[in-house]
């Protein structure tokens, strides 16, 4: 969402040596009085990717939104590079790349490149860094042929590529992806894998939530299943 300065990058390198890039401890959450998450613990070191699968309604999206600092857990704590989502809110969100499930977050009448340009401003990238960031995102997710076309003229898979490009544009330290392979063809899935590999090479970490049965779509370091409010080895 935001560009990291050299001081930020040094903070992250120090944090990576001293603590996991992403830490979830004792996370608990209920909806309507019904427990959804119960005592979830996740520690992701630099260069680690985790896939979480589970049935619809298992709580994958809730867990991902808590990790992104968008929902406050009833119990437990979240940190990214040692930063707290409440006490260090801006710095925390600078390091997060978030992809929600579905196809929301795009403006129908805006062209693909206009979304990227708008996001480069919302991400508070310096003016000189915006064009290189847009070009990098276009290349990484194969969006060149989509430039000049409005979003409402794009296929679902093309929109998904654009949404993914927005999530990775600012080179986050932690990527939180909710069903990223939805509507993607083989080339699109390969682009997601390349983005995750690049994230790992930069010392980042990722959680990828997938429906049950989709675990083999992406190559990740660890796989868990969310069942009965708890994470279990797959």
Image (cartoon, rainbow, N blue to C red):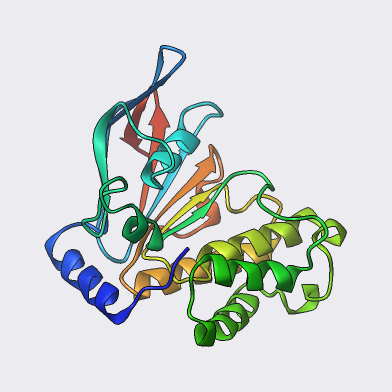
In this rendering, the answer to whether 172 lies above or below 207 is: below
Which residue is most to the left? 18
Q: Is residue 26 visible?
A: no
Q: Position of residue 215 (x, y in %)?
A: 50, 47
Which residue is most to the right? 153
In the shown orientation, is residue 131 left or right of residue 31? right
Q: Residue at x 74, y 79 (%)?
A: 144
Q: Position of residue 224 (x, y in %)?
A: 37, 41
Q: How many marks?
A: 0
Q: Nearer the viewer, residue 16 or 230?
A: 16
Q: Residue at x 60, y 44 (%)?
A: 101
In the shown orientation, is residue 36 left or right of residue 232? right
In this rendering, the answer to whether 140 lies above or below 176 is: below
In this rendering, the answer to whether 179 lies above or below 62 is: below
Q: Position of residue 18 (x, y in %)?
A: 12, 63
Quadrant occupied by the C terminus: top left
Q: Residue at x 57, y 72 (%)?
A: 120
In the shown orientation, is residue 70 left or right of residue 178? left
In the shown orientation, is residue 145 left or right of residue 129? right
In this rendering, the answer to whether 208 lies above or below 128 is: above
Q: Position of residue 21 (x, y in %)?
A: 26, 59
Q: Is residue 152 visible?
A: yes
Q: Nearer the viewer, residue 225 or 162?
A: 162
Q: Residue at x 39, y 63 (%)?
A: 94
């Amino acid at each position: 969402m935001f560009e990291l300065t050299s001081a930020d990058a040094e903070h992250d390198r120090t944090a990576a040596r001293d603590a996991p890039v992403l830490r979830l401890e004792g996370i608990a959450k209920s909806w309507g009085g019904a427990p959804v998450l119960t005592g979830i613990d996740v520690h992701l070191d630099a260069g680690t990717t985790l896939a979480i699968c589970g049935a619809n309604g298992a709580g994958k999206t809730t867990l991902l939104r808590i990790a992104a600092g968008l929902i406050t857990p009833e119990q437990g704590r979240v940190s990214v590079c040692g930063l707290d989502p409440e006490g260090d809110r801006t710095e925390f969100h600078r390091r997060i790349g978030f992809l929600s499930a579905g196809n929301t977050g795009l403006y129908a009448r805006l062209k693909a490149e206009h979304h990227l340009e708008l996001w480069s401003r919302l991400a508070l990238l310096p003016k000189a860094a915006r064009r290189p960031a847009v070009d990098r995102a276009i290349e990484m997710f194969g969006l060149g042929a989509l430039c000049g076309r409005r979003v409402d003229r794009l296929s679902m898979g093309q929109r998904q590529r654009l949404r993914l490009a927005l999530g990775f544009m600012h080179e986050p330290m932690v990527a939180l992806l909710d069903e990223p392979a939805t509507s993607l063809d083989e080339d699109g899935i390969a682009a997601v894998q390349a983005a995750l590999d690049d994230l790992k090479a930069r010392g980042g970490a990722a959680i990828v939530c997938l429906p049950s049965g989709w675990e083999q779509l992406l190559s990740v370091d660890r796989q868990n299943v969310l069942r009965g409010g708890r994470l279990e080895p797959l």
